Structure formats: structure tokens, C-alpha cells
Amino acid sequence: MFILVGLSLFSQAQKYTAESSAVSFFSDGAIEDIAAKNSKSVSILNVTTGDVVFSIPIKDFEFEKSLMKEHFNEKYMETEKFPKATFQGKITGFQNTAVGEQQANAAGKLTMHGVVKDIEVSGTVEFINGKVVMKSKFIVKLADYNIAIPQLLWQNIAEEVETKIEFTYKAQ
Amino acid sequence: MKELEASQKPEITYIGQTFKGTRIINGQSVETKPMGALEFIFSHRFGTINSGAYTLWGLDDAFVRLGFEYGLTDKLGIGIGRSSTDKTYDGFLRYKIARQSTGARNFPVTITAMGTTNVKTSPSEEENPLITFEDRLSYVAQVMFARKFSTNFSAQITPIFVHRNTVEQSEENNDDIAIGIGGRYKITRSLALSGEYYYRLNPHENTPYYNSIGFGLDIETGGHVFQLLFTNSLGMIERAVVAETDGDFGAGDIHFGFNISRTFQIKKPK
């Protein structure tokens, strides 16, 4: 019993939860550029093992035009069927004692629109005053996640979108 | 991942986009425009198909309604329109009272209430100086209850009340009550089939009019919704649809028509 409690305390100390999050994407379309931001994601990072999970609620992406948001949810992401995008993986290449921004890599499974894909992305990790800031920028190909562009809408959206994430964690 | 899910509070998920547009066919839907969005809606009804080749199956006769609707908030909309049928102006307010939701709060339907005032400007004062401004007025109140049963299927029931200040008493009521039912079924992400029927509860015993019925195909492109439709109603406002539908659908008095709507974002959403 004592050992169990001790273990859970120990593991608690290594875990950080995201206190703020910013996930955004940008699509360079032929007719109009489309950008959206989401600040409602949740994430847990284990700084000892590098294990990280995050969950992004699709309906909380905010666009410049309300019609874009409608189309994004109804036609592309099918949000009622697939309400969340999640990532479960491991971050490697950082020291949890080092100061300043460190390059790091993350590898794991990104689940979106009902499709699971193994991805590897690079980014940065920085420890500041007991907080951890993690940033990354990567490209998502719509076709990889079976996100079909409706024929009548094709000019409006690029087939690849640039995605940026920034999470700030504090100890649990 | 389980730990992450456990840490999240249960949320209310609102079910939106019950219909593609603010109209099902002739009648209104529970949809409101989002805050800051302006919809321009251009509707057309042609003559009856059974008028034959001489009028190119009705295409020679065209009736138009031009309308605007603006989202003051996500729930409250205001609109105006003008129909060439009877040269009628309409103005309305639409308010979304409740939204269908799941998750932390379950609510089965979306409810929207709407009030409309119409001014019929035909015949003109010169043509008939006896008609007063009050005679030209009519009012409509309706409450729409809609449920999105699945991503593809939505249905709506609409109790509707129409008051006309001046009518032909021998065959028309000042007050008409009807129940509207409507639905849509999405066949692809951008195409949907729709249908609508208004059943009059208290038609005048000598009424020359019919219950309104309509079928349509909704096509959604980037910023437009095209609704192609067939209906026995010539009017494009509720007063005319509920109380003045003069086509007998069974006898082939069917009008081809369309609604085209385009939404502009006037103010950025918050």
C-alpha cells in the first residue's frame, strides 16, 4: 500500500498539464486563405519519459468567417462523427534540466477524422520557471486523413495545411 | 489518453446546421444567421408547369422575392424582403429560443420563434383609393421545432398563425392557423433533398385555396446555397404560402422555382 502511494506520488510529480494551448492552421487557397485558431485543447506531458498526449476539440476552431467554420465542421472534418483530433506519442531529444529552448522530436499516433497515422515532427521544448513550453509546426495533408475536398469547393482550400501548436504546461 | 479524458469536464455539445439555409422550401427553418453575417436571398417562382408549351411550362411568368437577413447575435436575426407577387414588403425578427444539445445537457430540439409584418402595396392607392394602409397589413407568428435526427436527416414542425387585416369574408378568414412539417435528407455533403407541407387547421368553408406542398433539392457551394424546388405556392412569404396557395398540386398546378442565398460576413465573429 505504502509503495503504491509512493509510486503514484512519484509519477504525479513528473506530469505536467497544459494550462494554455494554441493550435492553429493556415491554408493557402487559390481564392482565399483560410486560417483558424483553437485554444480549447488539453494535454498531459510527462517530462521524465517524454510521453505526451493531447486532444483537440474540432468544433472549437475559430475562423474569420462563420461560414468557413460551418463548412469546416460539416463538410471536411465531419465533426459530429469525429469530434476530436488526438495525438499520443513520445518527445525525445530534450533534457529536463537544460536551460533555454531545445530542439526536440515527437513521434506517435495522430488521430483525426477517424484515421490514425504515425507521424514524426520536430519542434522545441523550453523549461521556464517550473513551466514547460512546447512548440511545433508541421504540415498535414488532407488526403492522409481521408478528408475529401467537395468538388464544388475545391478552389477554396489547399490540399496541405500548415499546422502550428503551442502548449504551456505546469506541474500537476 | 484515458487520464486525459478523465481530466476533461463533460461539455454541452450543441447540434447545429439542422438545415442548410433559413428556408426549407417556401417556409422558414429554425436556422438563424450567425452574428455579423448578412444573407442575401433571391427567390424565384415561375408559372405553373401545366400551362404548357405556350408559356414554356411556366417559365414566361416569373415572380421574385429579394430579401436580406442579418444576424444581430447568433440567436437574433432581423430581415426584410420584397415580393413581386402582390408587391408585398415583409419585415421580421427571428429568435432562437433553444438549441438541440447532447453531452452535459440533453435537449431534443432546436426552437426558433419568428414574427413577421407584411405590407401589401398592390393595388396602388391610385388604382383603389378606398384601401387604407391598415387594410394592407398582415401579421405572421410562428414557432419552429426542429430536430436533427442524424447528420443526414432533420425534420421540423411549425405551428403558424396568420392574421390578415382585410380579407374577402365570403371565402377567407382573417385568422388562419396551420401546422407546417418539413424535412431534409442529405444525399452527399453538398446535396440534400427537402420537402415541406402546410396543413390548414381552419380553412374557410368556401376556400378556393389549397394546402401548400413543396419538394426541393439543395445544392451548397462555397458561399452559396441553391435550392431548386417544385411547389403549388406562388407566394414566397408565409402569409401567401399558408393562406393564399391557389395551385392544386394533384392537378399539375406546380411552379418551378429556386432560392439562391449568399452569405457575407459583415462583422468578424468574436
Image (spheres, coloured by chain):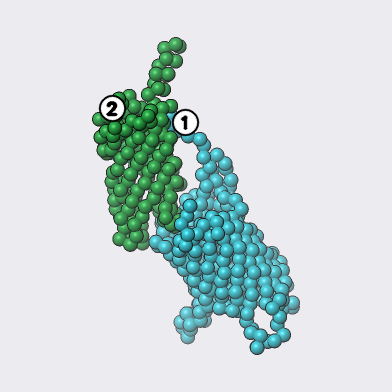
- Other residues around mark 2 within 10 Å, as few (<14) / some (14–19) / many (≥20): few
In the image, B28 versus B120, the foreground residue is: B120
- The colour of chain A is green
- Residue positioned 41% across, 30% down in the render: A170
Vertical placement of residue A103 versus B81, above or below? above
Please report the residue visible at 49 percent of the width from the left and 49 percent of the height from the top.
Answer: B150
Name the residue at the bottom extreme.
B126
- From the top left corner, tell me how far across and down residue A92 is, in percent: 27, 30
The residue at the far right in this view is B169
Q: What residue sits 34% from the left and 60% below the top?
A: A32
Mark 1 crowdedness (10 Å alpha carbons): few <14, some 14-19, many ≥20 = few
Looking at the picture, does residue A47 appear above or below residue A23?
above
- Picture quadrant of residue B214: bottom right
Question: Chain B in the picture: what colour?
Answer: cyan
* Residue A135 percent coordinates (x, y): 32, 38
Front: mark 2 or 1: 2
Q: Which residue is mark 2?
A: A98
User: Which quarter shows the N terminus of chain B?
Assistant: top left
Subunit bearing disc 1: B
Q: Is residue A70 visible?
A: yes
- Dividing the picture into quadrants, the one containing residue A131 is top left
Query: Quadrant location of residue A13?
Result: top left
When the figure is inspected, residue B102 is found, relative to residue B6, above or below; the finding is: below
Residue B206, percent from left and from top? 71, 75
Residue at image coords 63%, 80%: B121
Relative placement, left or right, of B265 versus B73 is left
Disc ID at residue B6: 1
Type of amino acid at the residue the image marks with label 1:
Ala
Please, what secondary structure does the residue beneath circle 2 have? loop
